[in-house]
Amino acid sequence: MSLPPVAPAVAAEAVAALPARLRKRLDEVVAQVTTWAVEVTGDGVTVRPDEQVAVTLKATVRTAEDAVCGCLLAPRCLHRAAVLNAAPVLTESPTPAVAPAGAAQAEQLDAPPVTTAQLDAAQVTTAQLDAAHGLWEAAAAVLANGLPGAGAVTQADLLRAVHQARATGLHGPAAAAIRLVERLRAGRRDDPAFRLAELTDDLREVLVACHRLKSGDGGAAGSARRDYEPVGDLRLYGLFCEPVRAATGHAGAATYLADASGRLWVISDVRPAERPATASAVRAPVDLGDVRLSHHELARAGLRAVNAHASATGRLSHGRARQAVSASGAGWFEPPLDALWQVPPAEQAARRLAAAALPALDRPAPHDLAFLDGVILGAGRHGLLLGVDGLTVAVSAPHGDPALPYVSNLRLLAAHAPGRRVRLIGRFTGPRRVDGLAVAASWLPAASGGHVDLGATALTRTDLPDHHPSPTTPPRTDPPDHHQGLTTPPGTDPPGGSPNAGDPDRAEHPAAAAGPRAGSHGRHEGRTTTVRTSPPLHLLRHQIERVAAAGRAVLLSGVDHDARRLAEAHLATAGTVLTALGAAGTRRTRDVFGRLDPHDTDRLAKAWLAAAVFEHAAGQESTRQSWAAHD
């Protein structure tokens, strides 16, 4: 049984109430909470640190009175503070006491949503400015100390700032800060779902919003999450399903569907869980009206919904009260789903980048999906390589946990199906890189139901058409790394013609029959291959993530070398911001009493933010160009 969600203010107050001697032990005790017994009671849960002490929490902890400990030191006790800071953060936002102009009406369900123009025209109030300063200082402290120093006390400072931001109507920065807290907790407990890149992006989003607010930009305040609203009658067709793992400790499954116009919808069942989701999560039933299907079955069928309700981002409201029944589905090669693969990859990537520029709460739920139709080229460093319209795309596994069959499925396809045509649904992750989610092909067994969900169904050798890989199509061992450069030597057919001749499921691709890849320069049958390198932005990204992970201490070495490499690659601005970051990280000044100057932390945050914003913008442009170019 997992712990109930806790309001940010309650968790922060519990830490603030602790004596100094108990605060020093808080991180140690928080790590022990997962081993304590948890019992479900009538209106909440009871956590028992030992036989004599019990901490009682209500189903949702909104006030200090909802969390009670039975020890003699309560409420200023270590048990209560540890439990509250080990529980997930309550994401619901209260009605703001001070709202920006034009945003107050948006809290009413019958009022139209606040537009971007209205938010941009809103004035930043004094209370909001104070809240933005508090959030900036808390996030800057996280940046200065890194993950090892972001313990429960530092997280409590962030949660206190989140409470103030929510109360003043800064919904966007508050939501980003909550995600940051959850990422910090996942990283400190070595959660397999933790991703340093996501922590870095959330930290950048918090600092960007605070910087904009301090500059008087009211559009950075964001808007509160709105309830589900009627979207009319829907006829949807299942696309695929996937197990869901979140750094917040939530797990479950999600099914993606499409209507006749090509709009994508999501129905998910994600809840707090003690263990990460496994492949069996998609076998859970879908809780929607009279639909009596599992997520796995719905992904291969369809549904009809009357007076459906959904969020503006495309997430369907579920529950038995909704009017919905199961219906027939459509294959990926049949209308209306076939149209999803007719959109060029460059246009899909541009659509994803445009959605990524929106606030996190305003992005469509399936905004980052990629629909690719191509040829399996062979094995890559992290999965397989796919040839798509003259592009070489690296397909990786979203999760490396063996409990999910992503890695084994991609390896099997890469080793035993090179040259075979497939349709793939993936998730954009960078320049010509996607995470593989599902595949379909005419040569896959009929038992798959039209497609294979790579994270839910484990392929076997007998599921593939050939029992032996083609000896004339050697697997590739290195993916197209656009940070390091790639080389595609021209392919030649073996004696007697192409090995794919006469096989409609095998298709020629310029790199499908290529031999071993060359290095930076090489020769292939007497012809010199050339290298097409991309800007080495990974050097800057590496330093940015290092600071987010370990704090200012990592800037003592390695920065000058990477800055020189960036300058040599004619990335003068990247080298400049990295040099400034290194200077801000190593500069420590003291006042007349010998104490460290707190302004050094602010300087580091500004320098890091400048580098992170530049890297993000340059990376987005590099991604756009990589999907638009051809090998």
Image (spheres, rainbow, N blue to C red):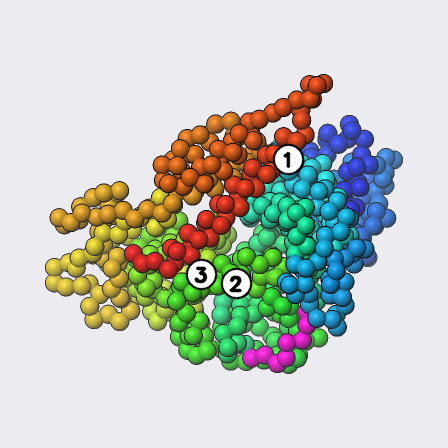
Give the amino acid type for the residue marked by disc 2 in the picture: His
Tell us which disc is closer to us: 2 or 3: 3
Q: Magenta part of the protein: which range?
A: 228-235
Q: Is residue 84 visible?
A: no
Q: Where in the figure is residue 357, as x and y percent of width and height?
A: 55, 57
| Disc 2 packing (10 Å; few <14; some 14–19; many ≥20) | many
Tell me if residue 57 is in the magenta stretch: no
The residue at which mark 2 appears reads as 367
Give the amino acid type for the residue marked by disc 1 in the picture: Asp
Q: Residue at x 53, y 72 (%)?
A: 263
The residue at which mark 3 appears reads as 349
| Disc 3 packing (10 Å; few <14; some 14–19; many ≥20) | many
Which comes sooner in the sequence, label 2 or label 3? 3
In the rendered structure, the answer to whether residue 495 lies left or right of residue 257 reads left
For residue 422, what is the image quadrant?
bottom left
Q: CA distance from mark 1 to mark 2?
A: 34 Å
For residue 601, what is the image quadrant?
top right
The residue at which mark 1 appears reads as 602
